[in-house]
Image (cartoon, rainbow, N blue to C red):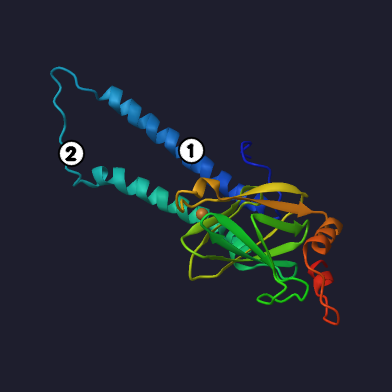
């Protein structure tokens, strides 16, 4: 595994790291091999007195093979990587597990805005709770994000969770994660989005479930008298 990565705290992070390592080692191997061959040829066939360069027209099959064989190898490796990474990709991008906490996330120059449904459990009502640059979630539970942008293209990136998703104005995109280790982690924008891009930084706080419940009780407004309080259902 690649040791310089930030600590993985998400349930699918191991799959992402495995895919990254696979690509890294395959590309690394071929990079070293091809650069080695290139250096060898540069030295071995350097200009020498009395030796004329050979003009290769690339018409014979033995000459074409220098292009076709590497192209076939690259294609085979690409397909192999696709096949190996397919299940992990489907798990992360296509089959979000049900249940857990839902947060609407909006990118804007130059903040991340997080909106919770509030005590009534419904988005778009008066008791919604919105915070700039603070995402709080319970450990060990699915977190479903609905991502959009108010202005330009941003990219929502939590390195420790191995989640990176482009955020586009005019579109809502779903993403999910399940963070297993309580703590405070950095959220960044990974798309150059304007002069304040460098400062588009937020934090993910992963709480123990009981602490998350306490956070909800202290940070969210109380449920109005007589109205149902949907808060307990946010933590199963
Ligand atoms: Cu941005």
Residue shown at 15% from the left, 36% from the top: 55
Q: Is residue 228 above or below residue 221?
A: below
Q: Depth-wise, is mark 2 or mark 1 nearer the camera?
A: 1
| Residue that numbered label 2 is attached to | 56
In the rendered structure, find residue 28 and report the number of the disc placed on it. Answer: 1
Q: Is the N terminus in the top left, top right, bottom left or bottom right quadrant?
A: top right
The residue lying furthest to the top in this view is: 49
Q: Is residue 10 left or right of residue 28?
A: right
- Nearer to us in this view, 56 or 93: 93
Instruction: Give the percent coordinates (x, y) of residue 165.
Output: 55, 58
Instruction: Find residue 93 and report its image quarter.
Output: bottom right
Q: Is residue 189 above or below residue 219?
A: above
Instruction: Give the percent coordinates (x, y) of residue 24.
Output: 52, 42
Q: Is residue 223 above or below residue 198?
A: below
Instruction: Give the percent coordinates (x, y) of residue 220.
Output: 77, 65
Q: Element at badge 1?
A: helix
Q: Is residue 9 left or right of residue 5?
A: right
- Nearer to us in this view, 76 or 146: 146
Q: Is residue 194 left or right of residue 181?
A: left
Q: Earlier in the sequence, mark 2 or mark 1?
A: 1
Q: Is residue 3 left or right of residue 82?
A: right
Q: Element at badge 2?
A: loop
Instruction: Give the percent coordinates (x, y) of residue 35.
Output: 38, 32
């Amino acid at each position: 595994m690649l040791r310089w990565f930030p600590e993985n705290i998400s349930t699918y992070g191991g799959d992402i790291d495995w895919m990254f390592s696979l690509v890294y080692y395959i590309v690394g191997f071929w990079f070293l091999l091809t650069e080695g061959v290139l250096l060898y040829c540069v030295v071995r066939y350097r200009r020498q007195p009395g030796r004329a360069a050979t003009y290769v027209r690339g018409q014979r099959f033995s000459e074409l093979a220098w292009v076709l064989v590497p192209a076939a190898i690259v294609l085979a490796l690409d397909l192999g990587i696709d096949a190996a990474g397919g299940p992990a990709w489907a798990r992360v991008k296509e089959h979000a597990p049900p249940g857990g906490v839902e947060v609407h996330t909006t990118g804007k120059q130059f903040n991340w805005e997080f909106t919770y449904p509030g005590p009534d459990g419904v988005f778009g009502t008066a008791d919604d709770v919105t915070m700039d640059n603070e995402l709080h979630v319970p450990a060990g539970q699915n977190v479903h994000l609905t991502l959009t942008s108010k202005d330009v293209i941003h990219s929502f990136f939590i390195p420790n969770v191995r989640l990176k998703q482009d955020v586009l104005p005019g579109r809502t995109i779903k993403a999910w994660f399940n963070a297993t280790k309580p703590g405070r982690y950095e959220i960044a924008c990974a798309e150059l989005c304007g002069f304040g891009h460098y400062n588009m930084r937020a934090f993910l706080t992963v709480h123990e479930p009981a602490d998350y419940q306490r956070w909800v009780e202290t940070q969210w407004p109380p449920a109005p008298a007589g109205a149902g309080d949907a808060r307990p259902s946010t933590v199963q």
